Image (spheres, grey):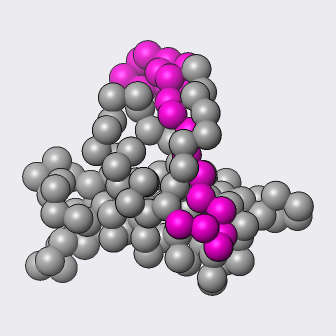
Amino acid sequence: MPFVVLNDHGEVAGRITLSNIARGPLQSCTMGYWVAEDQTGKGLATEAVRAATACAFTEVGLHRVQAETLLANVASQKVLAKNGFKQYGLAPEYLKIAGVWQDHLMFQRLNGTG
């Protein structure tokens, strides 16, 4: 489920996606997002994560939303924390970014928490 992130002028400033939606006993998805560098620090990512998480829990009816960040991406970790996500682990060599397998911190939020 892709969504665009709009700035205060209604211009596209980023994107957020709910993917890997699993039904059955898991009822979970993965959330990924980005905001253009010149649009950071304006609360856009925080609001986008809030809205996408609400959609996952209400409209999609999921139990869990998972997100991952690079270890050094403190800003994204703060966005997740503001939205009630809790860190629960470390995934070594989780994604290949810029040609290098990189470790990621794992976060989740359960429906009814946060």
Q: Residue at x 28, y 44 (%)?
A: 75
Q: In this view, does 101 lie above or below 58?
A: above
Q: In this view, does 35 lie above or below 95?
A: below
Q: Which residue is drawn at 58% across and 28% down?
A: 90
Q: Is residue 33 above or below residue 55?
A: above
Q: Is residue 103 above or below residue 69?
A: above
Name the residue nearer the viewer: 19 or 114: 114
Q: Which residue is drawn at 51% across and 34% down?
A: 105
Q: In which quarter of the image is residue 73?
A: top left
Mark count: 0
Direction bottom: furthest residue: 59
Q: Does the magenta stretch include residue 54?
A: no
Q: Quadrant of the N terminus?
A: bottom right
| Drawn side of residue 45 relative to residue 42, left or right | right
**What x and y, as percent, mark residue 106?**
56, 39
| Drawn side of residue 110 relative to residue 103, left or right | right
Direction top: furthest residue: 100
Magenta segment: 93-114
Residue 19 seen: no
Q: Quadrant of residue 60?
A: bottom right
**What x and y, as percent, mark residue 112?**
65, 73
Q: Is residue 97 magenta?
A: yes
Residue 70 seen: yes
| Drawn side of residue 54 relative to residue 79, left or right | right
Chief SS of the magenta region? strand
**What x and y, as percent, mark residue 15?**
36, 60
Q: Which residue is drawn at 53% across and 66% down?
A: 114
**What x and y, as percent, mark residue 88?**
61, 40
Name the residue nearer the viewer: 18 or 41: 41
Direction right: furthest residue: 25
